[in-house]
Amino acid sequence: MDLAEENAAKSLFAYCEANNYQVDILVNNAGMLIHGEVLTVEYARARSILNLHMTTPALLCRLFGKKMRQNGLGYILNVSSISAVMPYPTISLYGPT
């Protein structure tokens, strides 16, 4: 599944629900790298990295976290890159997201 798509979190959660998968551990570790300055990156590619790095993980935490709370069990690990705290001019969308 492409987690960079607009409704990826809902789709993944719905798939797990439809197949009766109980998710006890969620690891948000997907990422993509786009080279280029913010002003030169295609709009659609910028939207993809924002979805993949920020929107989808946050919504996955909300959807699966609520289910984990109901089940009384669950763990969520959100993984980040060291570039989040270091300046990298040619990957300016990667670090901040």
Image (cartoon, helix red, strand yellow):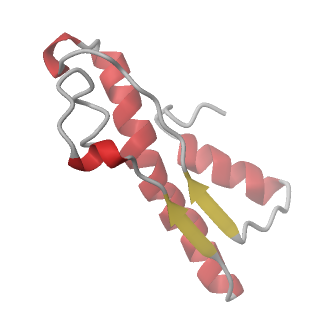
Pick the quarter of the image with the C terminus. Answer: top left
Among all residues in the image, which is located at the extreme left? 39
Q: Position of residue 4 (x, y in %)?
A: 49, 33
Q: Is residue 21 left or right of residue 74?
A: right
Above or below, 97 relative to 72: above
Above or below, 74 relative to 51: below
Residue at 27% across, 17% down: 43
Above or below, 52 relative to 62: above
Q: Quadrant of residue 70?
A: bottom right
Q: Is residue 33 left or right of residue 37?
A: right
Q: Quadrant of residue 21?
A: bottom right
Q: Position of residue 77 (x, y in %)?
A: 54, 65
Q: Is residue 70 left or right of residue 96?
A: right
Among all residues in the image, which is located at the extreme right? 19
Residue at 54% across, 41% down: 30
Residue at 32% across, 17% down: 35
Among all residues in the image, which is located at the extreme bottom? 72
Nearest the viewer among 34 and 67 is: 34
Q: Position of residue 1 (x, y in %)?
A: 67, 33
